[in-house]
Amino acid sequence: MRILLVSTYELGHQPIHLASPAAALTRDGHEVVCIDLSVEDADFSVLDEIDAIAFSVPMHTAMRLAITTASRIREARPEIPVAFYGLYADVGRERTLGTVTDAIFCGEYEPSLRSWVSSLDVRGPSPLVQIHLGKSDFEVPKRDLLPGLGEYARLEYEGQARLVGAVEASHGCRHRCRHCPIPAVYDGRLRVLGEELVVADIAQLVAEGAEHITFADADFLNAPAYSMSVLRRSHQAFPDLTYDVTVKVEHIVNHHDLWEEMASLNVLFVISAFESVDDRTLEILDKGHTVRDMTEAVGVLRESGIYLRPTWLPFLPWTKPSEIAGLFQFLDTNDLAGAIDPVQLAIRVLIPEGSLLADHPEMKPHLSHFDPEALTWVWEFEDPESARLHKELDRIAAEASDCKEDAGDTLTTMRSIISDISGVDLGVQTPVGMVPRLSESWFCCAEPTAGQATAVSGISFGGTI
């Protein structure tokens, strides 16, 4: 069969969630075509030769955009079977299953996706939902079907822009942070892919020109012995490669002894979900750390020579403008203003179906209803001034991202607005230093921007309609 795999967004990376299932389906004897709508101006006239379509939906933005695209395809070609697979595939099932999609596969989705494709020529599509969490065998991702690395985010460091490849060494997470979509599916489970496969994937990225590798795992130190072994083997094979990893605050602090070695293995920076400068909020989110721990984590990484890029979830129902000002003060005190993507300061918590946060007693009184279009529970701010501040910061971040504005200029604008609304004098902006960053802003928990939505709405369907 000829299968079309579609990605709408994967954080600015060449989509591994196309490359990995493409390898599995090719092994099964199917012909696979891949389209990445985040970088390709796709013409869906290819639908005339396609037997089935599967959309990769590893995050909220990807799911929103996939529903829009799949709906248009369903209108144009209602006879083609469609599946959604990935972390967000089951969100909004009442709206999607049986309408824009025939099948939903979550968790370790590849076995279910392969079985579905293989069964289509036997019995045709029927509404199907499968959440598979068992161990799976994987192939080395088939990246030759994807656009080249030059189409994706680059590492900006020391005045250079370097090609970046993204790999995953594991799926799932051992932790259950209440606002995160991963626990709703994996419930504390972790699945490793295997050292041989990960290093082989890195090798083909290097052959394509990658000079930097992002480990896209939810937490690189969920299984520290395994992850360090992968890192050592990769460094031995490619000593000039640099890396970034995502690690929880508590793991940064508790694995103090690993960071000197990780620096020697060319780990350049660490992404860590700090989320808030309010200890009550951190406890509600079940983050496993405090503001004091965050300050310690900054020191641990600085001592090792590894840069830190904290991420934030600043807006929740009880957030006050003064707390957003406090976040900026934390950045200034810890010299982190140059390590922030502006969109981080405008994120409002999303509460999708199945979120552990939806049932928390501090959150439940604020929830109104589930919005099937936005795929999230609707909530309002306690303080109208917080709502006004969020609206302003969200507008600034979205416009700056779509227009590729300088991060330092955007933060200056945000600082001024936060000062005006909170009444806290934040002074002048701390100069943005040479902190390594990827050229794509972090949109994992953000709504699609106007630019992303416009790109999807402008898709051409060639002569198929």
Image (tube, rainbow, N blue to C red):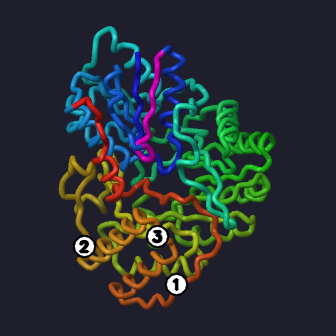
User: What is the three-letter code of the residue carrying label 3?
Assistant: Glu
Q: Which residue in the structure is indicated by mark 1?
A: 429
Residue 183: tell me if it is visible: no
How far apart are the two marked residues, 1 and 2, measured between alpha carbons? Answer: 29 Å
Residue 138: tell me if it is visible: yes
Q: Look at the image and say whether residue 328 sits in the magenta stretch.
A: no
At which x and y percent is residue 205?
Answer: 65, 40
253 or 13, which is in the foreground?
13
Tally of marks: 3
First along the sequence among labels 1 and 3: 3
At which x and y percent is residue 134?
Answer: 49, 27
Q: Which residue in the structure is indicated by mark 3?
A: 405
Q: Residues within 10 Å of mark 1 (few under 14, many from 20)?
A: some
Q: Which residue in the structure is indicated by mark 2?
A: 382
53 or 96, which is in the foreground?
53
Numbered disc in front, either 2 or 3: 3
How far apart are the two marked residues, 2 and 3, measured between alpha carbons? Answer: 32 Å
